[in-house]
């Protein structure tokens, strides 16, 4: 059984990949009625993922809520992300502590700040694990799971199950969006489940997000603002949003 949110995400990606698609094409592809497809398209249009046209849908010019590949995201705001990672490293636990590091283009920049510390590091990020493998004084644990191409991260039931057995001093988390109304969110259900488990594993939750993520609502919420202890962002972040987050109990650090 395909749930509505999963079908809608698949439809959005299909429209982006193939261009214009008709309601009839989509109904046949997903084995649902044309009325169901029209409702899905309305939801996706309101989310800014596509544009409805007569008889179907076409991609919008900029699809901010759809995931970009890790390499593509890594090229966005690189200097800001470096500063964010350096500031987030101030929240590392003392020698002998443990951390979980989420996959992402900003969290991956924590790697050089972990070198030279006595830490247990758990991650589902393949690229981060590769950078830390064999580094002295780091007890590295690579979490199991199916590797997603877009994020180079292990996800799935086995990843969530492994994280459910973990209690770390600090978790460092990435997000596709953070807003007052929707909390922290990401486009993919499996990524959301993994991030939700990372949040639950941490005694302290530190979120790394550049200014472009603030005020953004992605498809799947994985955490509430009350789950976050610290948000590290850059100095171009909206002052209004930062002030509101502070009022909601989130410590906001501008790097």
Image: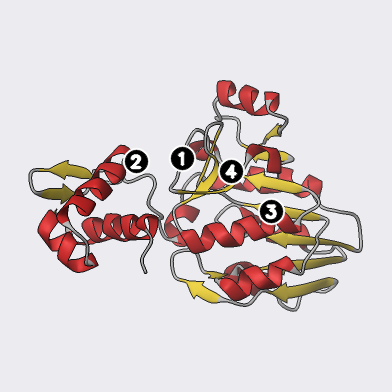
| SS at mark 2 in the image | loop
Name the quadrant containing residue 97.
bottom right
Label 3 near label 4: C-beta < 8 Å? no
Can you say which quadrant of the picture contains the C terminus? top right
Could you tell me which residue is drawn at 76 percent across and 55 percent down?
Answer: 202
Q: Label 2 to label 4, Cα distance in Å?
A: 21 Å
Foreground pick, 183 / 19: 183
Q: Label 1 to label 2, Cα distance in Å?
A: 8 Å
Query: Which residue has dot 2 on it?
Result: 47
Q: Label 3 to label 2, Cα distance in Å?
A: 25 Å
- Looking at the picture, how far across and down is residue 233, in whole percent? 62, 38
| SS at mark 3 in the image | helix
Front of the two marks 4 and 1: 1
Q: Which of the two labelled residues, at mark 4 and mark 1, occupies the earlier sequence position?
A: 4
Q: Label 4 to label 3, Cα distance in Å?
A: 15 Å
**Label 2 neighbour load within 10 Å: few <14, some 14-19, many 20+:** some
Q: Can you say whether 154 is above or below 46 in the image?
A: below
Q: Can you say whether 131 is above or below 19 in the image?
A: below
Q: Label 1 to label 3, Cα distance in Å?
A: 18 Å
- Looking at the picture, how far across and down is residue 146, in whole percent? 52, 76
Total residue callouts: 4
| SS at mark 4 in the image | loop
Can you say which quadrant of the picture contains the N terminus? bottom left
Q: Which of the two labelled residues, at mark 1 and mark 3, occupies the earlier sequence position?
A: 3
Q: Which of the two labelled residues, at mark 1 and mark 2, occupies the earlier sequence position?
A: 2
Query: Which residue has dot 3 on it?
Result: 199
Query: Which residue has dot 1 on it?
Result: 217
Q: Which of the two labelled residues, at mark 3 and mark 2, occupies the earlier sequence position?
A: 2
Q: Label 4 to label 1, Cα distance in Å?
A: 13 Å
Q: Can you say whether 55 is above or below 157 in the image?
A: above
Where residue 209 is drawn, which disc sits there?
A: 4
């Amino acid at each position: 059984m395909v749930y509505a949110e999963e079908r809608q995400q698949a439809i959005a990606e299909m429209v982006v990949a193939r261009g214009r698609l008709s309601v009839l094409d989509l109904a046949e592809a997903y084995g649902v009625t044309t009325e169901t497809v029209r409702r899905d398209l309305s939801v996706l249009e309101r989310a800014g993922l596509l544009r409805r046209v007569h008889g179907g849908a076409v991609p919008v010019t900029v699809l901010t809520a759809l995931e970009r590949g890790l390499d593509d995201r890594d090229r966005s705001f690189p200097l800001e992300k470096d500063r964010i990672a350096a500031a987030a490293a101030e929240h590392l636990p003392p020698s002998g502590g443990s951390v979980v590091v989420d996959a992402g283009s900003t969290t991956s920049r924590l790697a050089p700040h972990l070198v030279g510390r006595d830490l247990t590091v758990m991650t589902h990020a393949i690229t981060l694990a590769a950078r830390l493998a064999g580094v002295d004084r780091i007890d590295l644990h690579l979490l199991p799971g199916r590797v997603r191409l877009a994020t180079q991260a292990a996800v799935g039931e086995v990843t969530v199950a492994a994280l459910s057995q973990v209690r770390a001093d600090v978790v460092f988390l990435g997000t596709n969006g953070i807003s007052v109304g929707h909390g922290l969110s990401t486009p993919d259900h499996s990524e959301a489940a993994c991030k939700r488990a990372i949040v639950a594993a941490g005694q302290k939750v530190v979120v790394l997000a550049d200014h472009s993520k603030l005020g953004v609502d992605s498809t799947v919420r994985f955490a509430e603002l009350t789950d976050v202890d610290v948000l590290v962002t850059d100095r171009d972040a909206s002052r209004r949003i930062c002030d509101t987050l502070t009022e909601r109990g989130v410590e906001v650090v501008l790097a």
